[in-house]
Amino acid sequence: MKLRLKDIRSALGAARTGSVSMRRRLMLYFFAVLLLFSLLIAMLLFLFGAIDPLDSELEWALENQLESTANFVEWQCNNQAAYAISLSQQLTSEIKEELSDSKLTFDRLRNDPDALESVQNRLFSIIHSNMQLVPCSGAFCFLNTTVNDTLPDKSYQGLYLKYANLYAENTIHNDICMFRGFSSVARENDINLYSTWQLETKEGLFPEAEALMASKHESISKAGFLSSVYKLPDSWENVRLFCVPVLDPDGNTIGACGFEISNLYFMLSHKALGADQSQIFCALFDRCSDGYTGQISGNQSGYFPLVDSVFTAENDGNRTVFHSGGIEYIGKIREVRLGATGHVVAVMVPAEEYHALVRTVQLKISVILFITAIAILIFALWGSKRYVAPILKDLERVKEGVGPEQEGSRILEIVDLFAFLEQQDLEHEAAVSALHQEAQEAEHRLEHLQSELSQANRDYELAQVEISRLAYSRKQEVDPDEFRFFLGGISKFTPTERKVFDLYLDGKSAKEIIEILGISENTLKFHNKNLYNKLGVSSRKQLPRYAALMKQQETGTD
Amino acid sequence: MKKLFALFLVSAVMLPAILGGCGRGASSEPVTLTIWHVYGSQTESPLNDRINEFNQTEGKENGIVVSVASVTNSSAIDEMLTASAHNEPGAGPLPDLFTAYPRVAEEIGPENLLDWEEVLSEQELDTYVEEFLEEGRIGGRLLMLPIAKSTELLFLNKTIFDRFAADTGASEGSLLQFESLFDLCCQYYDWSEGSEMFQINDFYHYFLTNITGLGGQFIRDRKPDCSSAEFEQVYLPMARAAIHGGLCTGEGYASDRWKTAEVISNIGSTAGMLYLRDYVTYEDNTTEDIETRVYPYPTFSGASPVAMQRGTGLFAVKSQDERKNKAAAIFAKWITEKQHNLDFVCASGYLPVTDDASSTLFSDLSAVDNEKYQMLYGAVDQMYGSYSFCPLPLYNDSGSIQEQFEATVKEVLSAAHESYVARVEQGEDPETVLSEFLASSLAEIRNATEQ
């Protein structure tokens, strides 16, 4: 690995200096092209929605859970509403029959424990049976009357049954107990009293139900609503009530009935799906001055958040940021109408978990990118090696001088290169051969010239000997005083006389001197006369003899 | 190249593991433990308060959330656990923690339950009262950890009893022995024109303790033995009060009838104090404040004083997720730590489970804030030293046999009472009819338990 990285680094360094091997250059090209291609594909997938933003998985999970919870809450409430309307009608009918049997009016039930106990005994089976049909944690029927209106704390009559020992959404295994009602009715029907049982319900415990009981209603169905959450006194339970009015045959409101959804039942029946988001949970909220309050569920994974009763909330784009119990949550909300009242369904996940999930996606992408980059690099290395290897092999053969006919190349360009090089070789060989011949000829010429030069040198040496011999003989014929006078006369020459003298020394004839100097014969004779006088010679024959002697002296002096 | 290729292969092979495993880092997620318990029923449960405290303190530090998914009673929890363990239709999954009597372990399967000795050190276990630990050892494994214990006491609505005593001359001293107590029941029935004075929450316990006190043996060959002389000795005074009237043999807990003054006295768990109100409600919705008195468990004359050592314990369902097992151990240690245990038991009428907490509580009862609970622990303190305590015997199918015995006794005696009242109203001699029903009911119960 280190070696490869070193290769890449050296390739990049070499690329900068411009001296890169073919394989490295090809590897870098491959790597760059594949990387760019991958990025381009990723960008296109992102642009066309095939790849989602980092938090899209969570957004989808929240949106999906919100949709599911809202639908389930609405379904559950519709179910309760339908059964509550039916229950109301059955109660109206049963109370009418009871009053008829006992020859009482509804108003005469007030302050009559026995009559009210008898009514409750009659209503028990209706409430009990409806309770077992509906997804709920309890059922009730409040009546606009009381067993004792002389008491300072005002209360109203009614039968309120609850499941005891609730532990699962399904209630078939649960006993029923009495929250409100006559203990004798509980005894009669072989059920226990709720731990905080009371005979009647004190006014102010369920204000919304009490308002319903105090109003006149044209339609049972239109008056139905899901209440806010109430704490049951001296108990750890909090409940909502789905209420509809109970009317007498004349349409007057004589009470309210419906079903209870305790916080525990909501928690058991609305658990968010676990799967990837094990801390997602949902809630059914009502708005309050500080934010939201209501019922919350846990998650199928077993997770249950530790929260306060109130959630503060602020919008953050298409999400909502909640705070409760000192913990931040990120989620979504949706308004729902349950009966005549508006509520808010919310789903959320702890912000810490939300961010952890985003980091997980980031990590996944990083790992995928890393592996893709490694794969591209491997392909670049492998591809470049695979592509360049036969070329290098052929080039090596070229270096070794192995022709394509001996180990045929499969690369067309290399075959052409071999043919080209072969032609070049032939031309080169021909040129070399010509040059070789020329060199031989030149050698011959050189040898001939050298022999001629040797002959010339020999002739020159012989001439020199002869000249010396002649000079010596003439020197013996020359008067030394005359010769010294001769040498002294040279310095007295005019320029023209000197030219003439030199031309004589060069062996020129009088005719040639006349032509060379462009002078007349008389002029030459004039110069000659001056020359003879200054040199002290008496004839033209004496002049060359002294000149040769003078030249020999100069050569000998040199 | 080869190294790069190897890296690629390793990365590709590990990719699913990395992508799967790195999802939110399992170790950082909080561990949620669901719990079903029996402390508080529908009232503001003292255990729920402690659990909330745990969640906000120790739980928060260790990333543990204990979530209460059900608060019930010791009978109902057995049914719930059995239904869940057997995957009965509609039953939810088993909780991570639950409190129950040891008898339920057999239904769930002891192998599915956590051995506390695997997660708690010997030193930690040494702090618990040894007899309480012994009760939780099933098949050599410590499956039930004591978190609160109780014994049985006699509770009295003194306000109404005083009115009865003023008219009849009855004395509270008569409540200390069963023979005189049952006589008072009959007197009260006559005085109140048909109301019951006394209820025994658990007849099985009644026979177990009193037969043991008389030197007999109630459980023989893995079932109640009703044929012994001691059984008859314990049965007849009780049955006389039940058939005549005055001793309640109806279904349900005494605390229900206490609310409406349908009974004014009962023997039951110390923890029953939580449900015994300081007022009673009458049929016209008027209420009356009452004074509650607590007495040691009554005895039979000539018998050694014996009382029940009651109390469910904490079980943990063994999880494949080791973090859950450790979290269960952290919670168990926290709830039984001296001060937390004292806070819990003193708010609910239970007894602490460690020697240290127990000596702290009984060395200074004035430290208990609530006067009613101070009185309760005073009665328990009177029993310590003179009473011996026996736990529920654990044997095959003991839960359902106990339930069946309970139902048989109540059914036989209720039917006998109704018949007795009817025949007396028809003019028959009460004593003759009573004797007849005493004999027939005893035979019926013996016959039922022998089958």
Image (tube, helix red, strand yellow):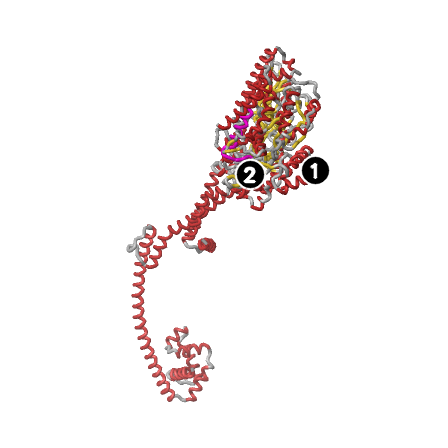
User: Going by the picture, which residue comes out furthest to the left?
Assistant: A405
Q: Which residues, given as a range, are shown in magenta?
A: B392-412
Name the quadrant containing residue B389. Answer: top right
Q: Number of marks in the image?
A: 2
| A315 magenta-colored | no
Q: Is residue A489 above or below residue A288?
A: below
Q: Residue at x 33, y 59 (%)?
A: A400
User: Which of label 2 and label 1 is nearer to you?
Assistant: 2
Q: Position of residue A137 (x, y in %)?
A: 56, 26
Identify the main secondary structure in magenta.
helix
Closer to the camera in the image, A450 or B281 = B281
Q: Is residue B433 above or below residue A70?
A: above
Name the quadrant containing residue A199. Answer: top right
The answer to whether any part of residue A433 appears in the image is yes
Q: Amino acid at mark 1?
A: Ser
Q: Amino acid at mark 2?
A: Glu
Q: Secondary structure at mark 2?
A: helix
Residue at label 1?
B366
Q: Residue at x 41, y 85 (%)?
A: A537
Name the quadrant containing residue A242. Answer: top right
Identify the subunit bearing mark 1: B
Closer to the camera in the image, A305 or A533 = A305
Q: Position of residue A48 (x, y in %)?
A: 48, 36
Q: Which numbered tag is attached to residue B135?
A: 2
Disc 2 and disc 1: Cα gap in Å?
30 Å
Closer to the camera in the image, B141 or A25 = B141
